[in-house]
Image (tube, rainbow, N blue to C red):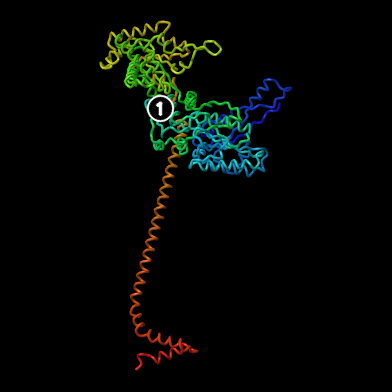
Amino acid sequence: MEKMTPKRVFINNIDSYASKCVAKFLCECVGGAAVDPDAGTEEEERTHSRAPAFQVVGTVSDTCHEDRPYVLEEYLHLNRDQLLSKLMDCDIVIYNITQHAEQLEEACWAASALHNEMERFTRPKMFILVSTVMTWACSKPVDPDVPFTDEIFRRRRAHPNFRQHIDLEKRVVKMGKSNRTLFSTYVVASGLQYGLGEQVFHFFFKTSWLGQEQEIPVFGDGCNIVPTIHISDLASVIQNVIEHQPKPYYLLAVDSSNSTMEDILKAVSSSLGPGKIQKRPFEEASLTQEFSVMELDSLLVNLRMEAVHLKELFSISWLCESGLVDNMELVVEEYQQSRGLLPIRVCVLGPPAVGKSSVAKQICEHYKLHHITLKETVSLSIAVLEDAVRSADPDADNEDSAAEAKELLESMKESMEQNGGLLEDHLLMKVVKDRLMSNPCRNQGFVLDDFPKTYEQAKELFYAEEQESEDGTSQISSSYKRKIMPECVLCLDASDGFLKDRVMNLPERLVQDHSYQQEHFLRRLDRYRENNIKDESVGNYFDELDTTPLYLEVSSSEEPDCLLLMQKILDTLGQPRNYGPGCHEVEEEERRKAEERMRREDQERAEQERREEEEATHRAACWDEWKAGLEGVRQQEEELLEVQSVPMRIYLMELVMPTLTRGLMECCTAHPQDPVDFLAEFLIRNNPFNS
């Protein structure tokens, strides 16, 4: 059995978003082997069939040192000769120019250098340019409802800021026509990329994730149709190009969606944020300092596109063929996993006055979680329902939901009136479930303070209903439990004597706020002890679900002991899982600095051009002024000469010219042989001043 040799693939900027995802995808691809049916075992055949199809190498920047075990070799700061040597060792060269404009020059050089070295190739090579649909941005459709396809790519017109991109596309295509068997070239025009942590859409995902009540901005009118593609699907397109080497050399890489920017951001906000958007002038986008210049231009693209060649030539295993909006749940999960934005869900239990709320507040402050208490949750739910009922429009489509909100509000108020300000269990469960299933709690996480109190409440709150599967068997749906089930349960405890002493030493104001009056406190303490003596306690319920509670004994109110207790809790929960100074944020900070430097350079360049223009205008004005002054001086000189010549003209006209004129006339009549001598004799004879 002969094992297939993996192809060596070069990718530029392998630590950037798109190139990194493509590299990881290709490294996970496996290739088949030339199997001999008469030799080897099934295990050997299986082993060979799992051999990697590609070995990926590439250039990196020094902005973020991230572990990339899937990359065979990484190159940093190579000169052109060194880079060409690395390119010559590869079977496929992929240059991604969708993110960094400074890669255009290097990509052009790399394609030209390989084309010039074709005679030295020991095996065929392929060059793939991953470009952008922004080279179509100014194309005029014949019919607005008919999408652009890659079959009419010659009619494309680039955005003014992407003319270098389209020039490079044309050069790459032309180079591949000289000898396709030896050096083939392809251009893959990618839609706006999403998935696996996000890039161009990251600002909106991050704003939604962080903003519990903040409306998500839509820059511009949001009506522009945005061609998109999941980054894994783009990598799959590139893999198919490598393996099938199609005849068309220009391919569109877009999914089948035709979503507008408003549709996309509404879906993002509904999945991660408050579900609200706000349209703002597009000029405000440049003030966020989150977007590169290329990304700002891309947000305004308005193209209806269809990737005809992908459907006709390849059998792509699409991950998100229907687009970002339809696959938002999957994309959000990828975003949270890739960015490490995983929620922390904690439940803090214990007898009254043991310090549950203080511990919960400190956990929430350290991990930026949401503190869930029954009193606040009920009050918030009533306020939300009242607002929904008050703002309901009888003629709107949500009339049924408004009626449901009104019915639930009336039931809650009636229950609280009949039970001394407390809700019945079934209403309380619904209110708490809705709060735990809200986007803020699902995104960042929560600390559930002193609830549930009984086994029955815990079972009802975290119970997952059985659902019938496709094969007819019943399965427990883990989706609901996975979203709200606490991953850590803290059970604080203390002796009754310690708790009574603590309550007696509390200020009167805190006693009233927490209902720690003697009879009420003792009744609550007895009820807690009774509920936890039973076999079916809250702690036992979590034990049954393989979530072992962490039991902590509180024996002192002194600060050192409290700090030790909190340190033990923080060690159990681990590091925060939110936006912090991680590698992604280092990359973003570096990008923001680079963008700020570029903006500053652009401003300085514009200022320099303005100064040069002012200097040119000033020089032209000075030249005009000098010419005007010179003309004035010339006129003055002519006038002065005119004045100074008047006496001489008078003298000549009166005393010289009459005699001279008669002499000349006589000379013309006589025609002497020597006219000058004749004129001289005439002047002597006829001198009026002779006596």
Residue 655, percent from left and from top = 35, 85
Name the residue furthest left.
Answer: 508
Q: Residue at x 63, y 29 (%)?
A: 53
Would you name the residue on which mark 1 appears? 210
SS under mark 1: helix
The amino acid type of the residue labelled 1 equals: Leu
Q: Is residue 30 above or below residue 646?
A: above
In the image: residue 423, left or right of residue 248: left
Residue 560 is at least partly visible in this image: no
Q: Which part of the image, by quadrant, shows the N terminus?
A: top right
In the image: residue 54, left or right of residue 574: right
Q: Residue at x 60, y 27 (%)?
A: 315
Name the residue furthest front.
Answer: 669
Residue 105, percent from left and from top = 54, 43
Q: Residue at x 36, y 71 (%)?
A: 637
Q: How many marks are shown on the rendered structure?
A: 1
Other residues around mark 1 within 10 Å, as few (<14) / some (14–19) / many (≥20): some
Who is closer to the viewer here, 409 or 599? 409
In the image: residue 508, left or right of residue 87: left
Who is closer to the viewer here, 540 or 341? 341
Residue 405, percent from left and from top = 35, 16
Q: Which part of the image, by quadrant, shows the C terminus?
A: bottom left
Q: Is residue 630 above or below residue 674?
A: above
Name the residue furthest right.
Answer: 38
Residue 255 is at least partly visible in this image: yes
Please identify the quarter of the rendering in which residue 253 is found. Answer: top right
Residue 328, percent from left and from top = 48, 25
